[in-house]
Image (cartoon, coloured by chain):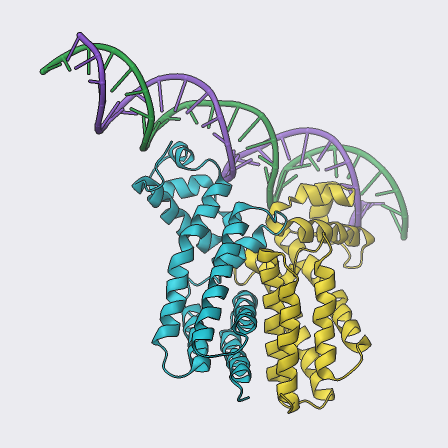
Chain colours: A yellow, B cyan, C green, D purple
Amino acid sequence: MPEATSPTRKRIVDAATKLFYGEGIGRVSVDAVAEKAGLTKRTLYYHFKSKDELIAAYLDGRDQPNLKQMAGWFDDAEGGADKKVEAIFTNLARAARHPKWKGCGFLRTAAELASMPGHPAVKAGARHKTRFETWLAGELSTQGIGEPQILAREIVLLMDGAFSIMLIHRNPDYVEAAGRAAGVLVKVRMGAA
Amino acid sequence: MPEATSPTRKRIVDAATKLFYGEGIGRVSVDAVAEKAGLTKRTLYYHFKSKDELIAAYLDGRDQPNLKQMAGWFDDAEGGADKKVEAIFTNLARAARHPKWKGCGFLRTAAELASMPGHPAVKAGARHKTRFETWLAGELSTQGIGEPQILAREIVLLMDGAFSIMLIHRNPDYVEAAGRAAGVLVKVRMGAA
DNA sequence: GTATGTATATTCACTAGTCGGTATACATGG
DNA sequence: CCATGTATACCGACTAGTGAATATACATAC
């Protein structure tokens, strides 16, 4: 049985992350991941019992970095809750302009696995999205906003909508528009529409 | 050269629609489409020059039916613009409860093709989403709402967010929440938050 | 009216390559 | 010796796409 903290395992997940995010899980072969990690497929299968498990490990590995990124943008922004929320979208729009940006890996993976609802990778995505929504509701509550859970969910909907439609239109204006809509909803809940 | 209105072509697109929507474009082989259509792969390749072109034809074929469905829900709803918009989401939530529902075919296809931005199927998706946004802005304008384009885009973002996150959580509450948020935004623009 | 020509439409058999996954063997360190 | 880890080589199934032949229909020519 391989170790969960093995450096070899980390190399595999790192390689998988770059390839799966860049090309999509269905367009990347296990051979390609093994080659990128600098080892053979058989070794990869020593550390992961299937490609599906590797995909789930890829998403699990993105959970904390992703949350930290969002929290950093939120914390660093000046102003009230509305400005802090809008700052997340502004930073997202900037990131989306980078040529290597390919949307949200969690959402894209769930879209590819739409016919397999119970897939471990979909569950990993659900955990991440729930954590983000819960974290955001907590921040909004701290900022003294009423009904923080409802508002957090609405912001999540706008954000994921922006992620998805960006893959169709490739126009960051949609992310900015989502940010402004989120700001409006925050202000409504702050009592000053 | 095959005819654009050929009944055989229609049979192929119908078969492709069921399979591509149900399983995802990457998980369906050209052989599977041909078998479902009751003809050989070679015949399919007589009518379509590549799988990519077939995928684009599948999405092009969904454009008008999809728009008509949305327009029907909007027109049939009683009340002001906010109620009519919310009605779209309510109907969407009901549809999403059906076991065969797999989200928005346009968004899922774009997610699968995220590494190929210029793909003809992505362009077909962009055309559809733009048509929907334009139609909605027109309806909102008719209902006497200021800044209908901005509002239409925000509603599109909420709807596509609901489509996407539903594939992760499989919980129609998100669609209802999006509908309520859309209603709030409409009311803000109607001047009575 | 029957032979010939041509465009449309379809089939069978095939290629060349990729897929996820595995059997077997060999190393290395405790 | 035995557990952990790595490598070569392979498997059967499947992939998108193609070559060559053929069926069908409808012309026009004689």
Q: Quadrant of the C terminus of chain B?
A: bottom right
Residue B164 placement, left or right of B98:
right
Residue A112 falls in image quadrant? bottom right
A36 over B85 or under it: above or below: above
- Dividing the picture into quadrants, the one containing residue B78 is bottom left
Pick the front one: D11 or B123: B123
**Is B97 in front, or is B109?**
B109
- Report the number of discs: 0
- Residue A15 seen in this snapshot: yes
- Residue A122 placed where, x, y %? 59, 63
Residue positioned 37% across, 78% down in the render: B77
Q: Is residue A61 visible to the viewer in this orientation of the structure?
A: no
Percent coordinates x, y for residue A163 in the rendering? 63, 63
Which quadrant of the rendered structure holds the N terminus of chain B?
top left
Q: Residue at x 65, y 85 (%)?
A: A187
- How far across and down, in percent of the image, does residue B116 sit? 61, 47
